[in-house]
Image (cartoon, rainbow, N blue to C red):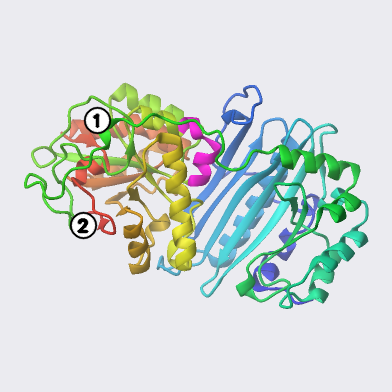
Amino acid sequence: MRLSPHRRRYAGLLVPWLLVCVAALAACNADATSPEPRGKHAEPEVQTRSLSSNDPRFHATWPHVRDAQRLSKALDRYVKATVDQFAHEYGETDGGTSAPELNIAWRLVADDDEVVGVRLESYLFAGANGETAGRTWWYDRASGRLRANAGLVRSPAALETAVLAAIDDPDIDRSLVSSSLEQGAPDVDFTDDGRLRVRFAQYDVAPGSAGVVAVVLDEAATTALLSPFGERARQAAIDQPPLGDDLPSVPPSPETTAPTDPADPTTPPATDGATGGATDGATGGATGGTDKPRVNCRKVKCVALTFDDGPVTDTNRLLRILRRADAPATFFVLGQQVQTYPETLARVARQGHEIGIHTWDHRQLTTLRPRAIRGELVRAQLLVEQVTGHKPTLFRPPYGASDARVLRIARSLGLAQVLWSVDTLDWKNRAVPPILAKVRGGARPGRIILMHDIHRTSVDAVPKVIKLLRRQGYHLVTVSELLGAPQPGRSYSQR
């Protein structure tokens, strides 16, 4: 059987989870809180874990399900092993716009009182073309056991026969389909209406241009194939609400949504790298209401605190810290995290902080095709608007990787690009003192400070960061207050 580079590299990781043996997740950012009652949108029911690095470039998120510890531990092991393999192979890079990247995203594909299903999708960019592969885990709440994908059907041989019969695309190599199924089917779930779906990794059974190949069986074939557990899993998949449904919202606030008029002579024009613009009425991202007087950053020393990659559970602790300190901030959020923590994002907006987007799942935009770039931005932008009532007008590209294509697409979506001036390296140095040292050494009027609310140590550092900056005479403001009127398609930072 021909294996793609992606599969050759990670073949040892696409075996049943019990065969994966790696070290404990000592380096993992643990985003945990005390459990609360179950519910379709109860945030503590499914919490996210994150592993992220700018060099080498990887970003992985996966769920912990409160009452499915064996499932959560299996996901821990798989993700950590995949990330370790990537980091070992690629090590540090040149940090260019085409640097190797690993991205792992997830989706809850089934969830009811009996069965949980989780699908992870990994994207590997190794310097030429990106390759995508998926894997699905099933957990039986009734027995407390993990169930293999093969347990969804009565007969693996019958599944192979049904999948081959359903293929009508001549570009799909049927012999490779058979070989892949004979080695196990790692990526099996259900459509919204309950039909069985078998996916094959990019390049495994068809040319790479076909992407991930999905074969969907009809209702009759699905019913004939499913085991008793498979029937329960199908029902759990049907019960799972579609993405984005029933999310809470924050009423729009007229006081904070009127943008500064670019033609207003009191507002200096935005330029690449410009900072320190007038701030009266400027709100470049989604915000909640606030009656706090605006700060004129042309007359006083201003800096902007920004937080990437959330929201997460610990974002709530950060919000309490910011509220007690009366300190505004700008949050560049991931759409996938908003989907998991909509109530936390609603709280960010209600507190009056600014909200920009950081794409849907943190993929390096410069390695994607234009349609995929647009999708990463649009999905996150629309979900934030659905939750907060405000459409974001700021975005930050993952890893700071951008180019002319990204900016053209951003302009068409009404998005200004915001980079940073001070990188605290909190993703690398998980301790308060080095974060404070970076802030102390980098703070200048008009600068944008980069932090991440997914790291507990970063949140721990925030009270001391605020105290340090105020001792030096700085006013803390949002990015749009700092810049004045960020313009779509323009890039802002001060190096």
Say if residue 446 shows up in the picture.
Answer: yes
Q: Report which residue position mark 1 lands on.
A: 255
User: Local crowd at mark 1 within 10 Å, few (<14), some, or many (≥20)?
Assistant: few
Q: Position of residue 369 (x, y in %)?
A: 48, 68
Whether residue 337 is in magenta: the answer is: yes
Task: Locate the C terminus and report the quarter of the image it occupies.
Answer: bottom left
Whether residue 138 is in magenta: the answer is: no
Q: Report which residue position mark 2 lands on.
A: 273
Task: Locate the N terminus and report the quarter of the image it occupies.
Answer: bottom right
Q: Amino acid at mark 1?
A: Glu
Q: Main secondary structure of the magenta part?
A: helix
358 over 67 or under it: above or below? below
Q: Earlier in the sequence, mark 2 or mark 1?
A: 1
Residue in front for this viewpoint, 474 or 276: 276
Residue at 69 percent across and 40 percent down: it is 72
Residue at 24 percent across and 30 percent down: it is 255
